Image: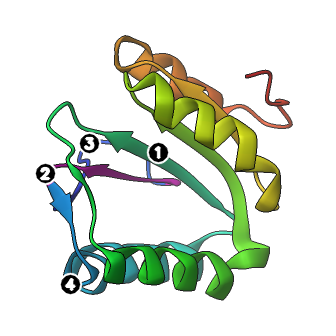
C-alpha cells in the first residue's frame, strides 16, 4: 500500500510504502501526486518512507516504479529515502546514481532532517 504523507511543505511530495505495494497503489496514489507536483514546480523533491510493516513489492508494482522513474526522468531533483531497513538503504545508495536526482538515505528518527535536506538549495548528497 502507498499512502501520501500529509502536512509537508508544498514543494515536497511525500509517500510511504507499507504492507505489500501493488501496481494499483501506483495508479491510484503515486502517479496522480507526481503528475500534480510536476505541473506546479521546476523539479520534484520527493520524500519516500519505507514503513516498519513494509513486506515488499508485487512484480507489477516494480514495473510501475520503473515507468514513473522513466516518465519523469528529467524532473527528479532530490529524493530523501527514509527507512530503518539497512538492506534497503544499501540498495538505494548503490543504485541512486541511476536517477538524475540527488539521493540521500535517512533513518526514521531522522524524518525532520530529511525534510530539511529536501528544502535546502544546492545541497549535495553525502550518504
- Packing grade of label 4 (10 A; few <14, some 14-19, many >=20) is some
In whole angstroms, how far apart are the C-alphas of marks 3 and 1? 12 Å
Q: What kind of element bears circle 2?
A: loop
Give the quadrant of residue 38: bottom right
Query: Quick one: 4 or 68, which is closer to the camera?
Result: 68
- Up the image or down, 124 lies above or below 65; here it is above
Q: Determine if the magenta segment contains residue 15.
A: yes
Verify CB contact (< 8 Å) between mark 2 and mark 1. no
- Label 3 vs 1, first from the N-terminus: 3
**Comes first in the chain, label 2 or label 1:** 2
Residue bearing mark 4: 24
Q: Which residue is mark 2?
A: 19
- 16, 41: nearer the viewer: 16
**Residue stretch rendered in magenta on the structure:** 11-19
Which mark identifies residue 118? none
Q: State the mark number for residue 47.
A: 1
Across and down, in percent, residue 15 comes to: 32, 53
Foreground mark, 2 or 1, reads 2
Residue depth check, mark 1 versus mark 4: number of the one nearer the observer: 4
Q: Which mark is residue 7?
A: 3
Question: Which callout, 1 or 4, points at the residue further toward the start of the chain?
Answer: 4
Q: Residue furthest top?
A: 109
Categorize mark 1 by other alpha carbons within 10 Å: few (<14), some (14-19), many (20+).
many
Q: Mark 2 to mark 1: distance in Å?
A: 18 Å
Q: Is residue 88 above or below residue 95?
A: above
Amino acid at each position: 500500500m502507498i499512502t501520501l504523507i500529509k502536512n509537508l511543505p508544498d514543494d515536497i511530495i511525500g509517500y510511504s510504502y507499507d504492507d505489500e505495494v501493488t501496481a494499483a497503489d501506483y495508479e491510484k496514489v503515486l502517479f496522480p501526486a507526481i503528475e500534480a507536483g510536476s505541473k506546479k514546480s521546476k523539479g520534484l523533491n520527493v520524500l519516500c518512507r519505507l514503513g516498519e510493516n513494509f513486506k515488499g513489492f508485487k512484480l507489477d508494482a516494480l514495473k510501475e516504479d520503473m515507468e514513473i522513474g522513466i516518465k519523469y526522468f528529467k524532473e527528479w531533483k532530490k529524493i530523501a529515502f527514509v527507512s530503518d531497513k539497512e538492506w534497503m538503504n544499501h540498495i538505494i545508495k548503490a543504485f541512486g546514481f541511476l536517477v538524475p536526482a540527488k539521493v540521500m538515505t535517512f533513518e526514521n528518527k531522522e524524518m525532520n532532517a530529511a525534510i530539511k535536506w529536501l528544502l535546502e538549495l544546492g545541497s549535495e548528497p553525502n550518504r
